[in-house]
Image (cartoon, grey):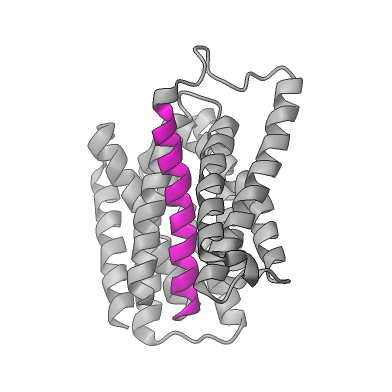
Amino acid sequence: MTALFALATSLLWGLADFGGGLLSRRAPALTVVVVSQSIAAVVLGAVVVATGGWSEAGPRLWFAVAAGLVGPVALLSFYKALALGPMGVVSPLATLSVAVPVSVGLFLGERPGLVQVAGTAVAVAGVVLAGGPQLRSAPVQRQALLLTLVAALGFGTVFVLITEASTTVTGLFLALFVQRVTNVAAGGTALWCAVRRGTPALPGGGLPWTSLPAYGFVGLADVAANGTYAVAAQHGPVVVAAVLGSLYPVVTALAARGFLRERLRGLQAAGAGLALLGTLLLAAG
C-alpha cells in the first residue's frame, strides 16, 4: 500500500507541477497559487461537509495550519523557477525535498533495510542526474536554482506536517481543507501586498474563464497528492514513502518532453532510468 500510494503521489504532483509551471508562464505565479488553491478549497469544503469531517477537529489541525503557511512559499518559489528555466532541469532538483521527511523518519527510529538504502540512493541520484547536464548556469538559471532549493525545503516540511495532521480518512479531508484555506489566506495576503506595490495580479488580457479548468486541475491534483502521501507515510516506513513520493520531477520532465518538446540529454535519460531502478529496489525491499 505504501509503494502504491507514494507512486500515485509522484504522478499527481508531477502533473500538477507541470500544469502550474505552464500557467506561470502566462500569469503571475502568485495568482496561479491563489486561484488553483481556492478552487481546491471549495471542492474540499464540500467533501468535508458531505463526510462529516468537522467531527475530527482537534489539536492536530495546527499541523495543517503550519503546512498551509509553508505551502504557498514553496509553491510560489517552484512555479517561478519552472517559469524561468526548462522544466526538465528545474523539476528534478526539487527531489532534494526528500531529505526532510527521511531525516525525520531516521530521527524517529526508522531503520530501512539494505535494499531500501540502496534504492533510496539510486532513486535520489537518478532524479538529480536528470537535471545535471544544464547546470552550467546563466544568471536566470542560477535564480531558478535558488528558488528550487527554497521550494524543496518547503515541500519537505509540508510532507512532515501533513502526515501529522490526521489519523483517519475523514480527518485527512478536514486537514487538507484547513491547509488549503490557510494557503489561500496566506497567498491572498501576499497577492494583495504585491498589487499594492504595483505588481499586476492578472495577465494583460485578464484571466479567461476557459483557463479555470486548468487551474482547478493543478489545485486538485496537488491536494490529492498531499492526501496520497499522508496515507503512504501513515501505513509504511516514512523513508520509503518519501523517496517514492519524490519521483514527481521525472513525471514533470517527461510531460515537458511530451508536450513542450524539451529535449532530454543522454545523462538526463540515464537519470530517469536510475530513478526507475531505485523505485523497483524500494518496492522490492
Give 281 or 155, whichever is nearer the viewer: 155
Q: Residue at x 71, y 35 (%)?
A: 190
Check the picture and name the quadrant holding the C terminus. Answer: bottom left
The stretch of residues the image draws in magenta is 211-235
Q: Residue at x 56, y 58 (%)?
A: 49
In the rendered view, would you say 175 is above or below 262? below
In the rendered view, would you say 164 is above or below 96? below
Asked if residue 169 shows in the view, the reply is yes
Asked if residue 263 shows in the view, the reply is no
Q: Residue at x 35, y 42 (%)?
A: 88
- In which image quadrant can residue 162 be found? bottom right
Position in image of residue 216 (x %, y %): 44, 40
The dominant secondary structure in magenta is: helix
Give 99 or 17, whichever is nearer the viewer: 17
- In which image quadrant can residue 42 be found? top right
Residue 70 on the magenta segment:
no
- In which image quadrant can residue 119 be found? bottom left
In the rendered view, would you say 71 is above or below 211? below
Position in image of residue 217 (x %, y %): 40, 42
Position in image of residue 10 (x %, y %): 38, 58
Position in image of residue 154 (x %, y %): 61, 54
